[in-house]
Every structure is written in structure tokens, then in C-alpha cells.
Image (cartoon, rainbow, N blue to C red):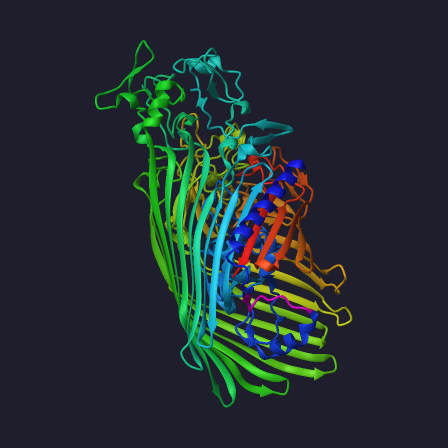
Amino acid sequence: MKLGVTKLSSSVRLALSLGAVIAVGASGTAFAQDTSNQSTTSSSQPDQQKAKSLQTVVVTGSLIRRVDLETASPVVTIDRAQIQATGKMTLGDLVQQLPAMTGGAVNPQVNNGGGTGGSSINLRGLGSKRTLILVDGQRLLSKDPNAIPADAVERIEVLPTGASATYGSDAIGGVVNFILRKDYQGAQFTANVGESDHNDGDQAGYTFTFGQSSDKGSIMAGLSYNKQDGVLAGNRSFSKNALTLAGSQVIIGGSSSTPVGRIQVPAGSTAAAAFANCPSDFVSLNPGGNSTQMTPANYHCYTAADKYNYSAVNLDMTPQERTGGFINGEYHLGDHVSAYVDAIYEKTSASFQLAPAVYGTDTTGASLDPFNAFNPNQGDAYNGSALGFRSRLTSVGPRFASSSRTDAQINTGFRGDFTVFDKNWNWDVGLNYGHESIVTTTGGLVNQTALYTGPSTLNADGTATCPAGVSAVACQFNPFDINAPASAAAARAAVASATSNQYLIEKTWHAGISGELFSLPAGAVQLAVGAEYRQERDVINPDTELLLDPTTGSCILGSQCLAGLQGGYNTKDLYAEAFIPILSGLPGVQSLNLTIGDRYSRVSTFGNTNNFKFALEWKPIDDLLLRGTMEEVFRAPSVSELFSSGSDAPNIHSDPCTGYTGAPAGSPLALACQFVPTDGSFVNSFVQSQTQASAITEGASVAGFPIKPESGKSYDFGAVYSPSWVPGLSTTVDLWRVNLNNTITSIGMQSVLNLCASGQTVFCQYIKRVPSGQNAGQLQQGFVEPTANLGALSTGGVDFSANYKLPQFSFGQFNIGVNATYLKYYQQNTGSDVYNNAGHLLPYGSAQAAACPDNVGVCLFPRWRGQGFVDWQQGNWSASWRMRYIGRFQNGGPAFTEQDTQPNGVPGTVLKYGATVYNDVSFGYNIEPYNTRVDVGVNNLFDKQPPMLYANNTLNANTDPSDFDLMGRYFWARVTVKF
């Protein structure tokens, strides 16, 4: 606790020092006034109400301009004050904490599968590809909220329900709309610092914002910089070791690709007789052993104790550095026409780090000649179709990839208004252009062609002699004694780096008009119509050394392989939305409004679709709003889902061919178990050793899988109650449901096996097994994980919220609130199995994890998620307490049922986990004479540790970095000076 006090004191001193230095030049000037974010008091409420009645706005979820802020759309708003109270310097961390987010997402804590500095948004657990990200109502190409400078944002509007009729493709789980700041007068400088209670994870950031407004228009611009240091997994007790749960035993070490080797013993050999009592036919090298002689003096039976502890050199927080800027401007060309531009730019540098490179027959396509000098079983070949081995090149150091990403988005055009028959209309014509460039430099891998494993002769001194033309260094490479000095030197000499490039471009030409058609007794009928034309293009140029070989599933560098890609498509949309006031001012019907909408889309790759929207609002009394929305949803497959390919290292928990004794020719089981021995002895080696396999991920077109767009319906029925007898109180409840057909997903290895064996034989073509020999039937490289339509998905639940601004007390003003989501069901129907995932963890590699839409290792679907807050303000002082709740969940189910994930390798095991609660606090003070504000805070105040999920069920840190905090208690401070 003393340490925490010291850190907090240091943060306060630093913030005050920064503020004092900056404020010297600011004293005597007035506070800048942001017209869109001024604090108010109760005495100004009548004026506010009057202004509000004259101003119409477009609320996320509708295209109609209205006075009402509460509509049929259940929008959750995060205002600027809430953003600042968290101390977060990037927006993704903030949005991911909303209760409507579930099911796994990428963020900077995700090392394996992340490391780009980006964050994904996963509304309703349907995935980032089914959540539409907007900036001022226009699409954001990167879909990464971290690519938006946080200082540019006025508020965030989150619509957690389908909106394809309103916004088009992708808006299935919902929409997140980032509203930019405008009409700012003055300048502002902000500095942020932070550090964890473990003396690591340092962060620093600076922003400068300025604006000017006049009768002719306005301009606002800003610059930002922030940096987050990386944190090694070895610096946290829960992640410093890869912990495998086997039965009731916890084993340190997670990978069978180990520097002491996992080397197969040839059946019927002398060595096989010497190791006849081994539980498997694999051995590992003894310390100081002679690798060229496979005897008990030099080798021992491979066991789980030989697994490599890869965790310590991995990262719990990936390093990131960002430089960005934004500019928003509007110029009035006349009384009714304006030109506008909204532009954001962000350059992000980030990286991930993994354990040293793996090397083996079934991991990188390695081979060893039968007559290589270092082959202890002369005459027996080691390759993907014969004997197998696995090793790890620890002498070359960790693998890493550094990403340099540039995101630019500009929306520009003209807008204005006109009057027809005394009816006001607004119009907008513009271009929204997005460009993303990613340069990835991969290091810590070896050029496998520079490691000689062909025929050679063993000399008396233990060295090898190779044919002419083979490098003297490469000749001494011994894959069974990786860390021998000569072998390590050969590996280091083969180290290579590779640079790959990716470019994404999106252009949207948009035109829209909205206004009043005519008046009914209940009010004005309004209409919004428009058209959009969107082009998307994706280009990937991998380094030649990373270029995927589709026959082996590997590449020259043996890891992080990918295929080249060039593809694109276009979409033409026509849309219309009408607002019809039916009744008003009647007993029991203060207002009754109907909204109908329709969007017609023609996608160049798949044809056309039509999506309809129906929404109803009914106010029986002024205090109560009842609302309901039904909207058809739609999503066309992306370019990457059609054409991309890459290497993968999946986990599997079972093989339908275990104990296989044969099946009728041509039957699903026979197709799934091709080449598997029929004597009942078969055991899948990856399942047995609880280690990762190798596979190729392929887009639908590459895999030759016929694919269709997703389609479905989204429903929301709710109520908003703001009792006049309790001023300041507002409550909401919404029942929601999403039904989705033809779900597009990457079908993992486990699912491919299960689907083929259960009768969906279209997947059998992707299974690749060793055809003969000692490893007959084992899965081998070249196994394909295709992108395909996987049955149907349905999910539903209830959202709750309550916000109360208490009466003013002599000791201050309090605001309290709660926002919660109950997940009633999340059902995934694959056509052969039905998985009920609500309340469950879907472990890495499991068939259930096919519902993991963002491929982040695990998916968590707790039934309850919630947030609560208490804000206090008194004069220049303010304070905030925020709570985040993640409900209990379990991993596993009854033996041999759809929920049986075997988290410890034993059927029927169920691991249960309790709820997790995080508490964050912050304090602030306005130093009025110097136009300065100082804020300090502590996130994860009570240093809550993440649950232990174990390495054999996860991909990162023995836990779920998408949902749980890996940093622990974290101190931050911020100083803001206005000029």
C-alpha cells in the first residue's frame, strides 16, 4: 500500500509540475469555451429546453432529423466527461468495457493474435465484422477505434441492435458512432502519464487542440502523441509460466516444441526396444547427451515435464506508439450552402513477441535425411509422411513482428438546406475516403533452406562432413541437439527478417436529402432518402520468405506464413426512411409514432438484397416511452473472407477417429478417418500431448467453398421511464434478440473434423492425414481451415440502465448510474451440433470456439455484465468511482455432450469461475487562476487478478486478455491547460 501511495503522490506532483510550467504562459487568459460540452446548472434548464426545442439532430440508428433524443433506437451514449474520467488514452479500451460487448475481442493485451495496436468492437458477441464503426455517421475503414484521436471525440453513441436498413452491410450486432468535436473556440494542451503497481507498463501522452469560429464558419484541429510500454508475461505471477491442466495435475510448460526435442522412435528398431516402456514413442535428449546415439544414456521418454515454458518471454501488454491529428472545418458559401471537411490521421507503431521459433516435421515442414550425420536412426527418414520430430530454436531468441500502420480518413463535401412550400429540407453530398497502409517486419525466424539436413557423414570428433557447396556452418546443424554450439551457430546464421505490406482503400460517394413532406394532426411526416456507391480494395504483398506454400502449409521461414492477395468489390445502395406521427395529445396516447425504412443494396460479388426496418414509439404518458424495432440485417463476405490464406497453429481437444475400428466405405466417419488404422489403437498425437497442430486458413474462394451472404433479423422491445416525481432519474429496459442465418466464419480444425464425421461431408476434403507408416492417420501439414457458412446463430437477452442526478446538496452534486446486460442465450447451430454458449468459456481450439468471430484464442459469454458509477462535484473539486462486473461462467459440461470441452483432457470435467469486479477511482481539481485542471486516478484499485484458465485452454497468459485486466493496479495522472 505504501508503494501505491508513493506512485499516486508522484503522479500528482508530476501533473502539478506540468500544469504549473504550462500555465505560466496561460495566466490571465480566459477559459476556452467548447460550446458542445459546457457544464450546466439547474438554473439554466429552461434556457436549455428552449434551445433544445429549436434544434433537430440525427440520432444514431435513424436517418431522420428530430428533436427527441430518446427514440425507438436504444442508444447508449458515452460523453466526453466519461471518456476523460477513465484516464484511457485510446478509445478501444473504453468501448470494450460496455456490457453489450461480449464474446472476445482484440486489444493491446492480446499478444498472440494481436500486436497491431488495434482494438476490435464486438457487440452482442457477434464479432467486429458484424459491428459497424462510424465517424459522424460515415464508415471508418480500419474499424479500429484506436485509430481515432481520443481528443477529437465529443461523444460515442452505441446502438446495440441491428441496423442494416439504416446503414447497410455489417450492422448486425449494432453500430458504434464516434461524434467529433466541433465549434471549439480557443486552445487546449493535455499531458498524461501512467504506470502500473509493478513499476512497468509506463504510458505517456500529449495532445494539443485549437479552434476558431465565426459567422463564416469554423475550424478545429488537434495533434496527439501517446506511447505505451510493453510488459513481459514473466512480470506477472499468473502468466510467467505456461500452466497446463492435465487431469488434476498442473504442469509447468505448454509446448511440445521443446529445445530438448520430441523425437519419434522408429518402430521395431533397437531404440524402440530400449524405450519400450515409454508412454509414447517419443523421446527427448538428456542434458549433455550424445544425440547421435538413441540410448537410455542419452535420451529419456518424452513426458509433459519436457514441455517448453514459452510464456515468460511473451507479452501481457504489447508496446504501442501513436502520432495523430484531426481537422474539422465548415465554411459557409452562402446562407444555405456550406462546404465541410472532417479528417483524421493516425500513425501507429506496435509489435508482438513470441517464444523462439519452432522447428519440426509437422510444425514447419522440416525434414531429416535418413543418412544425415546427426540422425540417430540411420536409414529412417524424418519428414511429414514418415517419422516426426519437434524442436525449438532457442538460440536465435524470441520471434517478433513490428507493425507500422497509417490510417487516414477524410469525409468532405457540401451540405445545405432549402424550403419547399414552407417545408424545410436538408441535403448532403460528399465523399468518404479511407486509406490504411500496414508494413509488418517479422524477425526471429530462420531461413529453413539455410539449415542443412541432407545426407552427410559423421566424423570421429562429432562434426559432420557435407557435400560440396554446403556451407561449413550450415553443415553442422543438428535438429536433435539444437543448443549444441555448432548447431546454435548454424541457426543464428540462418536468421532472417521479412517485410510484408498491406493496403486497404475504401471510397464511398454519398448523397442524401431529408425533410418534411406534409403535416398530420399528430405532427409532421418526415422523409429521408439517399444513395451510396462504395468501393473496397485489399492488397497483401508478403515477403517471398513468408509466402505460403499451399501444399505444405509452410514457408521458407516456417512461421507466420501468408499468401498474397488482391481483391475488391463495390456496393450500390438506395435507401429511404419515413417518420409518421400517428396520434398525439390523447388520453393514454401522448404520442404514437411509426418509422419505416428500406435499403436496397447491390453487391458486385453476390447480387442484390433488400432490408426492411419497422419501429414504433408509444408514449402513454409523458414519463413513459414504450418502443420496439424490427430490422432485417445483412452482411456480404469481406475481401479477406473470400481470398486470404495463411498459416495457423490450432489446438484440438478430440478426434472422432480415436479408437477407430472401421466404417462403411464412403460413410462420413470413413471419410473423416481416411488412412487411420482400423485396429482400434489410434490416438491423435495432438490431443494426447495437448499441443498445437498445423493448418492453413483459406478464404472461401481459395478453398473452393460455395459461400453466401449472411442474413437475419434483429429485434428490440423496450421502455424508457423518467418519472416526473423523481427529477433527474431515468431508467431503461430493453429485450433484444438477433437471429442470423448462413453465418460466415473460419472453420477451425476441430470443427472440420467434427462436421465431416457427423455427415457434412463437404468438409471432408479439407482433412489431411499421414497416408502410411508409423504415423498413419495422424493429422499433417496441409490441413485446410476454410471460411464457410456455418449454420445459424441466435442470441438474446435484456439490457438495463438507470441514471440518477441527485438533488444538489451542501456537500456537492452526485450522479449515480448502472448499465447492465443479461445474456439469456447464445445458440450456435452448425447443422450437426447445437452449442448453448451463454454462461460458458469457449476454450481455444474447441469446436464451440467456432463462434469466436475474431479468432482471439478464447470466447467468453458470461450471462451478466455490468457497469456502475458514482460521480461527485463540489466547486472546483470532482471525483468518480466506476465499477465493472463480469459474471460467473464455466468451462466444460457433461461428458460427451456438446458442452464437453474437456478443459483438463478428461471428459465431463467442469471448471467453474466466480464473478470478477474491477473498481476505478479518479479525482480532479480546477485551478481557476491558471486555467488548469489536474486529474489523478487508479484503475483496478484493488489489484484484482484475472482467473486462471490454463494454457491448454487459452492462447495468451493462461487467461482471457479480451475481458480481464492483466496489468493490475494502475496509476495515472493528467493535466489540462486551456488558453
- As drawn, 280 above or below 162: above
Q: Which residue occupies the foreground of this view, 592 or 414? A: 414
- As drawn, 248 above or below 850: above
Which quadrant of the figure has residue 11? top right
Which residue sits at x=42%, y=37%?
A: 400
Q: Which stretch did the figure color magenta? A: 33-41
- As drawn, 651 above or below 833: above
Is 500 one of the magenta-colored residues?
Answer: no
Q: Which residue occupies the foreground of this view, 397 or 171? A: 397
Q: Is residue 117 left or right of residue 718?
A: left
Q: Is residue 496 left or right of residue 849?
A: left
Please state, as top left, top right, bottom left or bottom right, where the N terminus lies in the image.
top right
Q: Position of residue 376 (x, y in %)?
A: 38, 16
Q: Residue furthest left?
A: 468
Q: Position of residue 559 (x, y in %)?
A: 39, 36
Q: Residue furthest right?
A: 725
Q: Residue furthest bottom?
A: 421
Q: Is residue 647 left or right of residue 582?
A: left
Q: Which residue occupies the foreground of this view, 199 or 962? A: 199
Q: How many marks?
A: 0
Is 36 one of the magenta-colored residues?
Answer: yes
| Residue 210 in sight from this viewpoint | yes
Which quadrant of the figure has residue 454? top left
Q: Position of residue 866 (x, y in %)?
A: 67, 53
| Residue 108 in sight from this viewpoint | no
Q: Residue furthest top?
A: 460
Which residue sits at x=33%, y=32%?
A: 447
Which residue sits at x=69%, y=42%?
A: 914
Which residue sits at x=64%, y=76%?
A: 47
Give the overall secondary structure of the magenta segment.
loop
Q: Position of residue 806 (x, y in %)?
A: 74, 63
